[in-house]
Image (spheres, coloured by chain):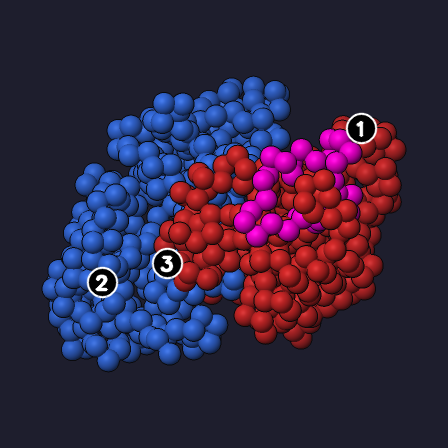
Chain colours: A red, B blue
């Protein structure tokens, strides 16, 4: 049976959870999926790096971070060595889960490039490289005969990109609209329940939904990156970040929300893109007062959803979690499953 | 480039629309999908049958039914000859779209058997053979090295079965719940707007949503078949029709609906199945007063939806059309796309 050797770049919540999944249910997954997973390299800003072609002992790795030990105490290095690890590791697949840099995507862009150049496939949950350099990196993957997969960059483990590409084949996709940020959706919901904008954000921060600086979520920057990814991947838009109009929810007042409620509407932060008759694509993020019978009006709290506008089926909508450690780690697993299917030519379960 | 030769069994709305799609956008689909489609046989109860290995002229076939001509006037036979056509046709794929018989699935079960036995793959939108004889027919397909696909038997072209099998791989599916009948959903919605049950049904009949005898939709028989299909396909339930508890919406009174509205709830006809701790599966159809923030409460009118309960992602929901000529014809096309992917070993777009 095939075993895929994997390198984890970044050992924060997402890749750590992937390691936990492999440690706790690797055998079961092997039976179900028809392949094994072995982690042969890990790098982390705080913990340093470790290369072990025979497989890293995951119990040890998962314990690091609780004390002062680093990989240097276990045969590795105190340095991150990302380029060296990525290029020289025996891994066939690199799981990139470092932080999203919305300006230039670095250092994740370099991580992905190094991997693809050295003939390794990449799975990532990082919006930066996909949104800002996606076309170029996908081309680099094709040139090197490897795969670049990034389902988790949009709605964590909820299938969106692959769903649209494989489940809606043969349809014309005219556009999409989605609720792609749980924090802003939660805040709008709480404002509907009577809280002020400030109180709702404070509550979201207390629950761990919102960052100390909530701007990325509240002002639509996060959704802007996701719309860019979906527009380029699904509509071949060929657009850049500046082409995605952006307006956050800070301009929505309690009076707006009350007025909407009276009119049978509900404010949502909607990311959308649409093909124009001339072939160009218009894309943006903005708060919209949706009628209650709109397919996205009932998407509440931290749930995300995307509605695809298709020619033969009309709207087809998928909803599910948009964030979360386990949910995002599953996205990496789903990417590996897709790579396996492509390599073996087995369209799963057909 | 591969061209698939196809036989259409039943030339009513669904297969006729598939023929229209092939006639009007066959070339475009060929460019997009990488294969061509050629209809080489058609049988129909009213129109008789026609076998033309070099391809049937679709303009002629689509014109039949407007006048008194049959296939006998165009080189075919006035008889249906289903067994002979299915067994002797040069078609590689049989599209079965005759009526659903909820008692024993015939004659569709025989159509599927004849095709699979003679080494032909089958796509069907017919709930009968899938719900009542699904496991047996799938086994027959495997024995003969061919495919038995039936995405359209549950939610027309909206991907449900294939979505759960391929997009949610590696997850544990604990159960599902769905709104699987547009007519009953429409009637409940109109009752919420103040109509009586009888008036709502009359309106649905006027709009063409409900049959003259609405029992199959209203009393849950249609949903029962769909739940049986999903439970056996996705949860390996190994159950029969009698194991799916069934209650329709005729017992829901205007008073029930008003009471639910006061409590922030909404009645829906929910089809569901769930794995029990002992490995068995409980399945049923019943009206349920869902809280408004439930993922299925906002599914309105003729839209259908299924919510999958997964271990790592929690609920993942897909919604879209559940019926319609074009929507159901697309389901057949999506089945053919899946067969092509399996045959060529190309997991599309990965």
Which residue is depicted at the point 45% across and 57% down?
A341
- Relative to A251, is A238 above or below? below
Q: Which residue is mark 1?
A: A206
The CA distance from mark 1 to mark 2 is 60 Å
Residue A29 at x, y percent in the picture: 46, 42
Callout count: 3
Q: Which residues are magenta?
A: A42-70
Q: Are marks 3 and 2 on the same chain?
A: yes
Residue B347 at x, y percent in the picture: 45, 62
Q: Are marks 1 and 2 in contact (CB under 8 Å)?
A: no
Q: Secondary structure at mark 1?
A: helix
Viewer-proximal residue among B19 and A217: A217
Nearest to N terminus: mark 3 or mark 2:
2
The CA distance from mark 1 to mark 3 is 48 Å
- Relative to B284, is B186 above or below? below
Q: Chain of mark 3?
A: B
Q: Which residue is mark 2?
A: B120
């Amino acid at each position: 049976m095939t075993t895929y050797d994997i390198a984890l770049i970044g050992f924060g919540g997402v890749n750590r959870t992937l390691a936990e999944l492999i440690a706790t249910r690797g055998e079961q997954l092997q039976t179900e999926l028809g392949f094994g997973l072995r982690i042969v390299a890990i790098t982390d800003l705080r913990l340093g790096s470790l290369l072990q072609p025979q497989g890293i002992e995951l119990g040890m790795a998962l314990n690091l971070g609780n004390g002062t030990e680093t990989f240097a105490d276990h045969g590795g290095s105190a340095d991150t060595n990302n380029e060296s690890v990525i290029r020289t590791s025996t891994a066939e697949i690199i799981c990139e889960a470092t932080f999203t840099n919305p300006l230039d995507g670095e250092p994740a862009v370099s991580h992905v490039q190094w991997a693809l150049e050295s003939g390794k496939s990449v799975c990532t949950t990082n919006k930066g490289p996909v949104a800002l350099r996606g076309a170029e990196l996908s081309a680099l993957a094709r040139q090197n005969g490897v795969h670049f997969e990034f389902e988790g960059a949009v709605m964590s483990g909820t299938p969106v990109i692959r769903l649209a590409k494989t489940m809606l084949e043969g349809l014309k996709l005219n556009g999409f609209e989605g609720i792609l940020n749980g924090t802003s959706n939660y805040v709008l919901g709480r404002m509907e329940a009577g809280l002020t904008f400030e109180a709702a954000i404070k509550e979201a921060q207390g629950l761990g939904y919102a960052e100390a600086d909530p701007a990325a979520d509240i002002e639509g920057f996060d959704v802007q990156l996701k719309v860019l990814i979906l527009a380029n991947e699904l509509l071949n838009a060929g657009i850049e970040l500046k082409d995605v109009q952006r307006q956050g929810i800070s301009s929505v007042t309690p009076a707006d929300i009350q007025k909407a409620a009276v009119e049978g509407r509900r404010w949502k932060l909607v990311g959308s893109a649409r093909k124009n008759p001339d072939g160009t694509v218009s894309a943006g993020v903005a708060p919209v007062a949706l009628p209650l019978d709109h397919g996205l009006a009932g998407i509440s709290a931290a749930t995300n959803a995307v509605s695809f506008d298709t020619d033969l089926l009309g709207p087809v909508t998928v909803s599910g979690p948009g964030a979360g450690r386990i949910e995002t780690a599953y996205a990496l697993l789903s990417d590996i499953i897709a790579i396996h299917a492509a390599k073996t030519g087995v369209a799963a379960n057909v």
